[in-house]
Image (cartoon, grey):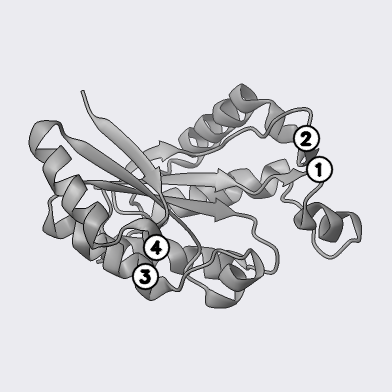
């Protein structure tokens, strides 16, 4: 049994770190941290709300307590290239989190992102592009990092794009099929 806490790195002040230390003595604790991207211009666009240095401090504090942490990333962020996403994966290889969640960008109704999408300022990832991108991420990630998620599904009543993401089983099946067909495994392109 594990206590899993999802939070933002800027919510891990000294008082919270001390509380996590105490909790971890009673029951194992995992902490999920939202990173999304290492690129500050993208982070500013999505209004992440904290600099990369804040994330790094949170990771260092959790490592000092020997508390495993899981990092959330988003694939398909507006303006971000595949190379930039792989730079985020390489960065995480150096940080060495316990796990990672690869999340597809969802465009939801009544958001600024939806306004930009509907105005044609960016395109959502296609099914094929997403599968290829996840495979590339997995190939670059250290085999020591536990993969906690490779897709997700937004609320059907709010989801504008990509609508193909509603078929979660189909996404997972195609990912498995292509990785097997291409002979690709997690860590195949990992470099220390």
Residue ID for mark 3? 54
Q: CA distance from mark 1 to mark 4?
A: 27 Å
Residue ID for mark 4? 10
**Which badge, 3 or 4, comes first in the chain's sequence?**
4
Q: Secondary structure at mark 4?
A: helix
Is 181 placed above or below 65 here? above
How many tags in the picture? 4
* Among the 4 quarters of the image, the one containing residue 44: bottom right
Residue at x-position 26% and y-position 32%: 3
| Disc 3 to disc 4: CB gap under 8 Å | yes
Q: Nearer the viewer, mark 4 or mark 2?
A: 4
* Horizontal and vertical percent position of residue 42: 60, 70
Residue at x-position 65% and y-position 49%: 105
**Which badge, 4 or 2, comes first in the chain's sequence?**
4
Label 3: few (<14), some (14–19) or many (≥20) C-alpha neighbours in 10 Å: some
Q: Is residue 149 visible?
A: yes
Label 2: few (<14), some (14–19) or many (≥20) C-alpha neighbours in 10 Å: few
Residue 62 vs residue 18, the one in the foreground: 18
| Disc 2 to disc 1: CB gap under 8 Å | yes
Q: CA distance from mark 3 to mark 1?
A: 30 Å
Residue 89 vs residue 131, the one in the foreground: 89
Residue ID for mark 2? 158
Q: CA distance from mark 3 to mark 4?
A: 6 Å
């Amino acid at each position: 049994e594990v206590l899993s806490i999802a939070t933002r790195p800027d919510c891990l002040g000294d008082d919270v770190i001390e509380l996590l230390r105490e909790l971890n003595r009673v029951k194992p604790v995992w902490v999920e941290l939202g990173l999304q991207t290492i690129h500050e211009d993208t982070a500013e666009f999505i209004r992440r709300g904290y600099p990369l240095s804040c994330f790094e401090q949170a990771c260092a504090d959790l490592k000092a307590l020997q508390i495993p942490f899981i990092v959330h990333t988003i694939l398909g962020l507006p303006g971000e290239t595949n190379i930039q996403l792989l730079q985020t994966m390489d960065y995480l290889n150096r940080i060495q989190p316990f796990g990672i969640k690869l999340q597809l960008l969802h465009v939801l109704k009544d958001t600024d992102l939806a306004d930009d999408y509907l105005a044609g300022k960016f395109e959502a990832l296609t099914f094929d592009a997403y599968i290829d991108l996840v495979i590339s991420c997995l190939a670059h990630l250290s085999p020591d990092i536990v993969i906690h998620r490779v897709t997700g599904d937004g609320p059907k009543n709010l989801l504008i794009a990509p609508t193909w993401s509603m078929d979660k089983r189909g996404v997972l099946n195609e990912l498995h099929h292509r990785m097997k067909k291409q002979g690709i495994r997690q860590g195949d392109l990992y470099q220390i």
